[in-house]
Image (cartoon, rainbow, N blue to C red):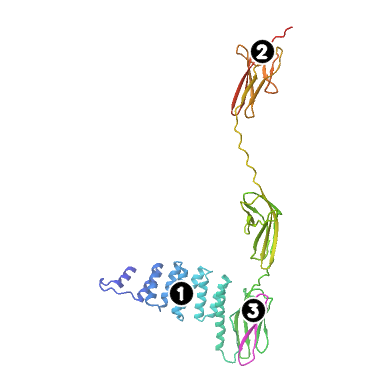
Amino acid sequence: MLISFIAAFFCNGCNNAKPLTAADYLSLGERYLLELNYEQAVVQFQNLIEIDPMNPRGYTGLAEALVETDRIDEALAALQQGYEALPNDDEFLEKSVDVHKKIINRYKLHLAAYIGLIKAYISLDRIELALEALNQGLENLPDSVELIELGASAALQRGKAASTRPALLPIISVSEPVFRLDEGSSASIKLNLEGDSDAAVTVQGVNEEGEPVSGFGILSGAVPYISVDPSLPAGLYDVTVTAKNATGESSFTFMVSIKAKEPPPFVPAFNVSNSSYSIPAGGGSIALNYTLTGSEPISVSLQASDSNGAGASGYFSINKNNKALGVSGNTPPGIYSVTLTASNDAGKNSAAFKVEVTAAPAPEPPPTPAVAPKINVGNATYWIYEGGGTITLDYTVSGTAPISYSLQAYDVSGSLNNEFSIGNTAKTIVVGQNVYAGEFTLQLTASNEKGSSTATFNIIVMVWMH
């Protein structure tokens, strides 16, 4: 159906095309909204605004479509454009209220949505609703100066409504919608009181929780003033003054904003956990783990000297965030005195400690390569009588320790004889008692991880001559 609807405007036998009118764009925009085709709705309402900028539905329809596509800032900009074009158009203002509420329901922290809603209510002369929207905004955005000032404007509008009452009615107000004070300071606020008869003036303040407070009073005199108790804590207060005489009464509400007192600055207190630190030459970082208290901002400076008292600050640096002392790689070995000074507007404090930069150890010599053993024989032939005993061989051995030794003995027939063994030292050969006269060949082998070497000795066992 929508395609047929559009075609009706562009083609009548495709010969007499007519441009779309504002009513056409409005109808298309509403149809696209109903069909949830928000992108096309945006296009049609933009076209409507372009050819009929005084049509309130162009702005509110565009804003609705933009909200549904989550383009909140663009939606608020469209409403602001409409507000500038139609500031007193009730149709526009009523619909803009609905759009602002929809945005706030989705995004409770959107400041611009609260501002737009409050402005719309004020323009519609619905001051109480504007103040309700203000309270809702301040619950979610308690520190918003824009909301406070806009709410004060709403309060001022409510107070001005009293000016339409009969002349004899007391009319009370103050010069500013918001008074800003510092915590702990006393103040008096002048009241403006109009009317033909004497009036009794009372004041009541409430805090942000809506609880009554007793810190506001009336200073009587020819010109009445409101006194503000210096003991009132920081916060926002709604203050309502009421003037009453025989004719009737009127009230005016304004805001008092008390700023929290800044605490007095504290001199930094510096404490370094150790009195001395050590680091090898070559540079690096030392964790100081110090404690530093006092009022920010605090700056930390460094001074250093060597054991002769000469300046050495260039070798060191301080990282306040990491509480670490940086030591340059070219710092000569030695003992240094380091002083850290913390300063702020209230004063300064220092902490001193020693830093020993130790010389780098001499590099170890490379290991000597292992050498296989070599036996150098001094005497190759030895004599011993039957009955056993020991023989000390004459030889030297070179090579890398540890060296192990093994021995094998053979008779003249080549048979292995186990009566020969190595004694307490590798040069001592033990000859068993059962070895009879004869000639024997001993093979002594020296071994280590690199290899082995074998030497041959001749042993002649002789017969005892009786």
- Toward the viewer: 309 or 118? 309
Q: Which residues are magenta?
A: 181-203
Quadrant of res 441: top right
Q: Determine which residue is flagged by label 2.
A: 460
Residue at image position (66%, 90%) is 222
- Secondary-structure class at tag 3: strand
- Secondary-structure class at tag 1: helix
Above-or-below relation of 339 to 137: above
Q: Determine which residue is flagged by label 1.
A: 79
Q: CA distance from mark 2 to mark 1?
A: 127 Å
Q: Amino acid at mark 2?
A: Ile
Crowding near the residue tagged with mark 3, few <14, some 14–19, many ≥20 C-alpha atoms within 10 Å? many
Q: Are marks 3 and 2 in contact (CB under 8 Å)?
A: no
Residue 260 magenta:
no
Q: Earlier in the sequence, mark 1 or mark 3?
A: 1
Left or right? Give the position of 178 relative to 86. Answer: right
Q: Determine which residue is flagged by label 3.
A: 205
Residue 1 in view here: no
Q: Nearer the viewer, mark 1 or mark 3?
A: 1
